[in-house]
Image: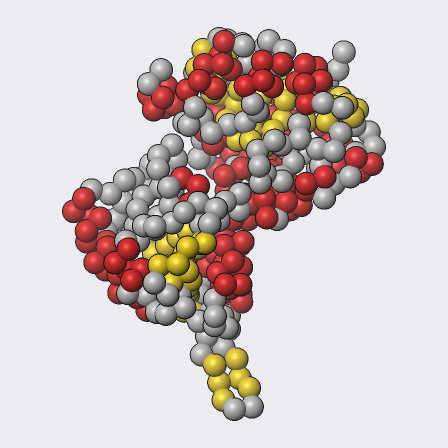
Amino acid sequence: MPLTLGVLAEMLPGERRLSVVPDVVKRYLGLGARVLMQKGAGAPAHFRDEDFAEVTLVDSAAEVAAQADVLLCVQAPSAELIGAMKPGAVLIGLLQPWSDAERAKRLADKQITAFAMELLPRISRAQSMDVLSSQGAVAGYECALIAADHSPKFFPMLTYAAGTIRPAKVLVIGAGVAGLQAIATARRIGAMVEAYDVRPETREQIESLGAKFVDTGVSAAGTGGYARELTEEEKGKQAERLAKAVAQCDALITTAAIPGKQAPKIITADMIARMKPGAVVVDMAAETGGNVEGTVAGEKTRVGDVLVIGPTHIASRMPVHASEMIAKNLFNFISPFIQDGALALDWEDEVLAGTCLTHAGEVRHAGVKQVLGL
């Protein structure tokens, strides 16, 4: 029997992405694998069942889980679906490894080999597999559009018969993939953009996109391409310098995140109170607690005359291209280990080993074990 790859309909409310797209299915088939998919799984991402002509379609998620040798997902499956999986099967997706000790133990007890794409090593060879980066680019783009849509001002300079309208000023906090995409998108729309990141090496990237770097004198360069957590003294110095830049902007977009931890609080209520009337704040980190004091995930709130938006499932707002990107990331991760229609995992491969959450009845990732207290 050829290797069976299973694709589920995503069950999390608000999640519209799909873990495969038709072009990527053809690539799996070319490796000798069989693809099994739940009927209607692609509908939220605007893919029809007939777009997957060479895929075996079944009625329920449980049928997919019970037959799949490798189960592809965007979000982690439910406890019930994990229970329906074949012992020894492989699970690949965004599994939120730091958030749920019970799920990690359940996967281990079921003898599931689970690869959490959030754990992917940050090395050059793994860039084509980096789901966090691809989906971060989608989120950064969307957040710039959300800010422009809710701003009471034009983003670009506008000349009309009676004079000239000055462009809006946008401040982006965080210059990872999402932040850089937000900067680039706001610039394309025509705004004047400033940006800040605690990692000084991002200055060149920010300025290369035509934005001005806000220098607070605080550096938090960390390991693996991520920022470290700031000390209380550093947070105070950062806040003092940032407050002035925040007060002058028309739209603020925050993108700072620390994997496995709550989002750092960077923007205080006092900073928001000093913003211009009609200013807009888009807190991309709302789902993990937010960078802005007073952010409510999934809601728009008023703080004085400032609108604070806490969007959730941001990448799912653009599900066609977001699905295409994540599907290619997952294919690039697992395809080197599919040979002649069979799966042959190479545990000497640092990307494979570094991404592994559970295998052979235990939670394998040391960092996750420490955070979850396992």
Q: Residue at x 45, y 35 (%)?
A: 123
The residue under the point 48% across, 46% down is: 298
- Does the image show residue 225? no
Q: Quadrant of the C terminus?
A: top left
Residue 24 in the image: x percent, y percent?
Answer: 71, 35
Residue at horizontal 51%, vertical 34%?
Answer: 126
Q: Position of residue 127 (x, y in %)?
A: 52, 38
Residue 122 appears in the rendering? yes
The answer to which quarter of the image holds residue 208 is: bottom left
Q: Quadrant of residue 5?
A: top right
In the figure, 139 relative to 374: above or below?
A: below
Viewed as shown, does residue 76 lie left or right of 215? right
What residue is at 40 percent from the left and 39 percent from the top?
288
Q: Residue furthest left?
A: 233
Q: In the image shown, does 154 or 305 lie closer to the viewer?
A: 305
Q: Is residue 24 left or right of residue 49?
A: left
Identify the colour scheme used: secondary structure
Establish if 319 lies above or below 107.
Answer: below
Work out whether residue 103 or residue 300 is closer to the camera in this orientation and state it: 300
Left or right: residue 308 compared with residue 52:
left
Residue 261 on image: x %, y %: 35, 34
Q: Quadrant of residue 134?
A: top right
Relative to 190, does residue 70 appear above or below in the rendering? above
Specify the quadrant that holds the N terminus. Answer: top right
The location of residue 129, given as percent across then percent down, is 55, 35
